[in-house]
Amino acid sequence: MNPDVVAALGALNSTLSGIETVMDLDALRKDIAELEEAAAKPDLWDDTENAQKITSQLSHKQAELRKISEMRQQLDDLSVMFEFAEEDESLLGEAQTEQQRLAGAIESLEVRTLLSGEYDERDALVTVRAEAGGVDAADFADMLMRMYLRWAERHGYAVDVYDTSYAEEAGIKSATFRVKAPFAYGTLSVEQGTHRLVRISPFDNQGRRQTSFAGVEVVPVVEQADHVDIDEKELRIDVYRSSGPGGQGVNTTDSAVRITHIPTGIVVSCQNERSQLQNKATAMAVLQSKLLERQRQEEQAKMDALKGDGGSSWGNQMRSYVLHPYQMVKDLRTEHEAGNPAGVLDGDIDRFLEAGIRWRRQRQQA
């Protein structure tokens, strides 16, 4: 076999073996067995929330084990394909194509092993807000929200939209949604920061170029084991009528809920549930998540100060989407770029996420 091919297959084997070690396949099989036992209990669905958590974890872990097993088999098959290609050169192109595909899949899986933060395994609570730029910024915030929803759809992840505040002319002022997937927080947390759009404004009748900004906040969803103390006396709770785009009423009762945490100034809203009680419960969960993340950031800032980090944050302006005078999306931290803004804004952001995760791990190690 060609020495270059042998070296390439050896590198893939080494990377995959490293992934198998980090993910501890024996422990993964043990977890699956325990979850299967829990899922088989007749009283499983007496507690709906716990049942959903168990079945979701089981499905995810089974998929992970299956993915690794399939990659190992594909790597073995690839070696055989190259051996056949030595005797039949017409098979070489197919073998090389499969090699590239498998290399990309293994690389993506390797990135997943870098997610080892305290909350990385959890669902993600994402808030997108329009910032400077007027109606263009509101439209851009709407574009970013769609980008994340399309990304989730591509991967088969469920999303719950908790609240959307529509702008008067176009787009949104803000939106908060939950991405329900293992490691959603660890994956999407690298999206936090200010995103910048440069384009010919569709809202400018003189066709001038406009720069607008939108902010993305990503926090982990709270769980029962988290300790987030909230004093009811420190909350201001307002109820109002839910509304749709352009201020159109979509609910005839005051069921939407807005909660203001007075000490921190954090404001959360929910209007997607049917009742005021449900909206309040969801809004409280969102508030707990944001307070938990605030607490984590304060603890991190103390550690950075002790280490002499200076508290510098990478989460400010982090990506530019340029639609005019040329077409490019570029991450300002990782230098990763793509020449297809339309594809990126349609949810093709995996390479940006992977580059961000690797960049963050390098900074942590440094």
Image: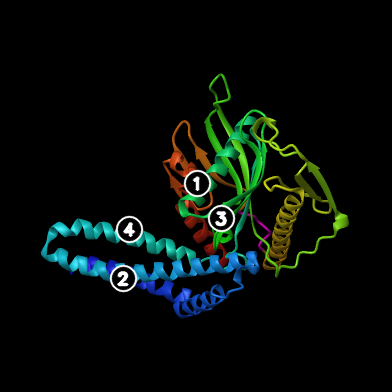
Q: Earlier in the sequence, mark 3 or mark 2?
A: 2
What range of the chain is rendered magenta?
Answer: 309-314
Residue pointed to by mark 1: 150
- Residue 2 visible within the image: no
Pair 4/1: label in front: 1
Cα–Cα span, label 3 and label 2: 30 Å
Looking at the picture, does residue 310 appear above or below residue 135? Answer: below
Say which quarter of the image contains residue 73: bottom left
For residue 300, the mark is: none
Q: At label 4, which amino acid type do we have?
A: Arg
Q: What is the spatial separation of the Cα atoms under label 4 and label 2, in whole angstroms?
A: 14 Å
Q: Are marks 4 and 3 in contact (CB under 8 Å)?
A: no
| Foreground tag (1 vs 3) | 1
- Name which residue lies at 36% across and 73% down: 14
The residue nearer to you, when weighing 294 against 244, is 244
Image location (x, y in percent) of residue 146: 54, 42
> Which residue occupies 25% across, 68% down?
77
Question: Within 10 angstroms of label 2, few (less than 14), some, or many (20 or more) residues?
Answer: few
Q: Earlier in the sequence, mark 4 or mark 2?
A: 2
Determine the CA span between mark 2 and mark 1.
Answer: 31 Å
Marks 4 and 3, how far apart at CA:
24 Å
Disc 3 residue crowd, few under 14, some 14–19, many 20+, Cα 10 Å: many
The disc, 2 or 1, on the residue closer to the chain's N-terminal end is 2
Label 4 vs 1, first from the N-terminus: 4
Residue at image mark 4? 101
